[in-house]
Structure formats: C-alpha cells, structure tokens
Amino acid sequence: MTRASTGLHKLDAPTPFEVWRIDLAQHLEHVAIASLSEDERARAARFVFTRDRDRYVSAHAALRELLAQRTGRAAGELRFGAGPQGKPYLLGTHNCSFNLSHSQDVALVVIADAGEIGVDVECLRAFPDASELADRNYTAAERAELWARPAHDRDHGFLRCWTRKEACLKAVGSGLSIAPETFETGLAPIARTVDVVGPHGSHRVRVDTFDAGPGIVAALARIDAEDCPVPGPGHHMPHSRL
C-alpha cells in the first residue's frame, strides 16, 4: 500500500508488526506538517542544515499520520510522553506501541498492539572503520562471522548485525546502559531470541531482519506484552552509537 502524498509505503513484515517506509525526500502536504506540536517544531528549528530539518519534519509528520490512522484520533491532537532517555510513548492509550528510526532519506515506523518494540534502519554504504566498530560492539563470535564473509559483502554483514543490536536496545529502552557487545544477535537474517541483561534485570527479546527495500538494512525487535510494564516515565530510548 502506498500513500504518494506523504511518501508512505506499507511493507511486508513479520507478525505482529505493521511497518511503514517513509521517503523523507518527498514533499509533505501542509496539513501534515501542521499536525506537529510546538515542541516538535522547536526541535526542527534547531537543526543547522535545512536537509536535516526537512527529514525530521517529514518523519514526525508521517508518524503522526500513521498513529492517527491506527487510533482513530486526529494527528494534531496526539500527545506523547517521554522517558528519561527520550523514548516516546502515546498518551491516552496502552494498546499502541510504536518506534521510529531513520537513515539518510529513509525512515521506518513500526507499530504493534502491545509489547515493547524497536526498529532500526541503515542505508547500505561503505564502512572503512568497520573493524574498529566491530571490535568495540560485537561479540567474538559475531566478529568471526563478519570476517568470514567475502570482502565485498562485509559492509552489508556489518550493518545487519548493527541494526539487529540497535533494534534490541530500542525495544529494551536501555539508553547507553547496556553495551551491545554483551549480547549476541548474529549476522544471519533469521529470527532469534536474545537475552539482553541490563541494570534492571534480563529481557528476552525476539529480533529479526526484514526486507525494507534495495540498499536498506533493517531489523525489528519485540518484548512480549506479558514481560513489559505499562508504558510510562520509566521507558526510554537509546541514542544511536553509529
């Protein structure tokens, strides 16, 4: 399904996720931009470069449109709370979990009825410092798996592992308090259950890689609702370490 006016494309995704890809370079209608809150507009105004400001506005306006469709509420009337590290949650409902990630001109929004969820996306590109980053952030088994890959495919493998780890951390809401090298997602594009241990206990996270389009690497993660507290001030989002 595509909504050309806002650059939204619904993707095939594993159950129970609903995933949308957003073309951040596509012009947004003024009515969509008008739905942003004063806080969102103030954040957008702080970007130094116009390109970055436009990407932020496009992503957040599209997020509001999607959540409005999901909840039956007006996009401009949606209100969000935020945890200590910035992970937003939707006020007024406990049956609509969501997460947003972007890379260059691509953003992904994932929505589910329940549970803590995380999504991460990266546009495929060269990483001259992949070895250094892997040494700091990957387990020994993941590093071995990376260097066993053909040289021409290592950047893809590196990003596949990276997005899987970031999606897990965003689902947990750990901020930078959990080091990515302390848990193992692997590079293989398969569903896997991962134990992520943080300062407040252990979390069983289900992570999977999925197809978000040519030149895009993406992963989803979920903690089942029965293992999650109700969304509120204790929930927070990590900042990307890439």
Image (cartoon, rainbow, N blue to C red):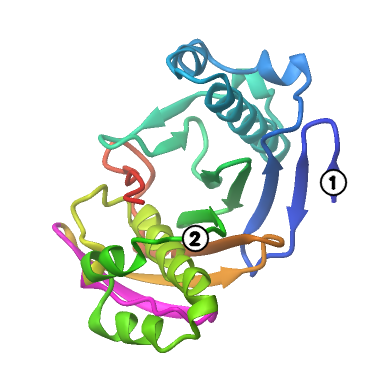
- Looking at the image, tell me whether mark 1 or mark 2 is earlier in sequence order: 1
Residue 187 lies left or right of residue 216; in this view the side is left
Residue highlighted by disc 1: 2
Q: Magenta stretch: give its range.
A: 182-199
Residue 158: image location, x then y, percent: 43, 70
Question: Tag 1: residue type?
Answer: Thr
Q: Within the image, what quadrant is residue 27 found in? A: top right
Q: Residue at x 21, y 61 (%)?
A: 179
- In the foreground, 200 or 118: 118
Residue 68: image location, x then y, percent: 68, 32
> Does the residue at mark 1 contact the one at mark 2 (Cβ under 8 Å)?
no
Residue 166 vs 2, above or below: the answer is: below
**Is 198 within the magenta?**
yes
Judged from the image, the secondary structure of the residue bearing numbered disc 2 is loop
- In the foreground, 109 or 157: 157
Q: Residue at x 54, y 44 (%)?
A: 102
Q: CA distance from mark 1 to mark 2?
A: 30 Å
- Residue 210 — which label? none
Residue 121 vs 26, above or below: the answer is: below
Residue 170: image location, x then y, percent: 38, 53
Q: Residue at x 13, y 58 (%)?
A: 199
Nearer the camera: disc 1 or disc 2: 2
Residue 123: image location, x then y, percent: 57, 54
Q: Within the image, what quadrant is residue 133 found in? A: bottom left
Judged from the image, the secondary structure of the residue bearing numbered disc 1 is strand
Q: Residue furthest left?
A: 199
Q: Residue at x 36, y 47 (%)?
A: 240
**Is 3 within the magenta?**
no
Residue 63 lies left or right of residue 1; in this view the side is left
Question: Tag 2: residue type?
Answer: Ala
Q: Residues within 10 Å of mark 1 (few under 14, many from 20)?
A: few
Residue highlighted by disc 2: 126
